[in-house]
Amino acid sequence: MAKGPDAFRTISEAADEVGVAPHVLRFWETKFSFLKPMKRAGGRRFYRPRDVLLLTRIQHLLHGEGMSIAQVQKLHREGALKAAGATDGAQAPAPRDLDLRARARLNAVLEDLLAAKATLDLLLRPR
């Protein structure tokens, strides 16, 4: 029985969804202080759906866009991590060129699209 789209994921499940090994997620937690999965007694990690979306963005930026860890850290510090590379292939405006209201609207739309994609990925996954 597959988990629902709002269910928490173990590190193995999150790693499978993102397309990396579990040790990569643990490594990313050391490099990206904003990655904070829930931890239960004994230190077992549980990733929320929004954590998996963020991990997917990081994976895309690092492996798809070829960014370095330092570049992704900088995007986060600038508050543009969600907006960067929002479209696969198409050129999005640079975050610094957008006013705060436009950036907030785009981030909200991106969140909705990423949530919809995660749901579709779960529904379309071979059983």
Image: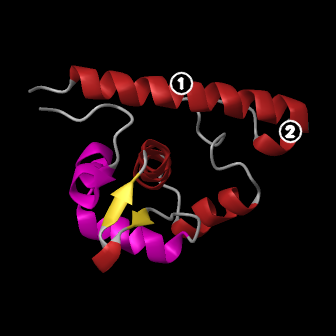
Report the amino acid beneath label 2. Asp
Quarter in which the C terminus is drawn: top left
Q: Which residues are magenta?
A: 9-32
How far apart, in angstroms, are the residues tagged by discs 1 and 2? Answer: 22 Å
Who's the residue at 69% across and 34% down the image?
107
The label nearer to you, 1 versus 2, is 1
In this view, 123 is above or below 118: above
Say which label, 1 or 2, has the lower sequence index: 2
Residue 50 rendering spot, x and y as whole percentages:
49, 44
Check disc 2 and report its element: helix, strand or loop: helix
Quarter of the rendering containing residue 105:
top right
Picture coordinates of residue 4, whole percent (x, y):
29, 31
Q: Is residue 119 left or right of residue 123?
A: right
Q: Can residue 28 be seen at all in this image of the molecule?
A: yes
Residue at the extreme left of the image, as rendered: 127
Quarter containing the N terminus? top left
Q: Kindly indicate the quadrant of the structure image that contains residue 126.
A: top left
For residue 101, side relative to residue 50 (left or right)? right
Up-down relation of residue 95 to residue 112 (above or below): below
Residue at screen point 52% across, 64% down: 68
Q: From the image, tell me which residue sits under label 2.
A: 97
Which secondary structure type mostly characterizes the magenta part of the structure?
helix
Check disc 1 and report the residue beneath it: 113
Residue pictured at 67% horizontal, 58% vertical: 76
Q: Nearer the viewer, residue 3 or 83?
A: 3
**The residue tagged with tag 1: helix, strand or loop?**
helix
Q: Position of residue 40 (x, y in %)?
A: 35, 69
The answer to whether any part of residue 88 appears in the image is: no
Of residues 75 and 123, the one drawn nearer to the viewer in this rendering:
123
Callout 2: 10 Å neighbours few (<14), some, many (20+)?
Answer: few
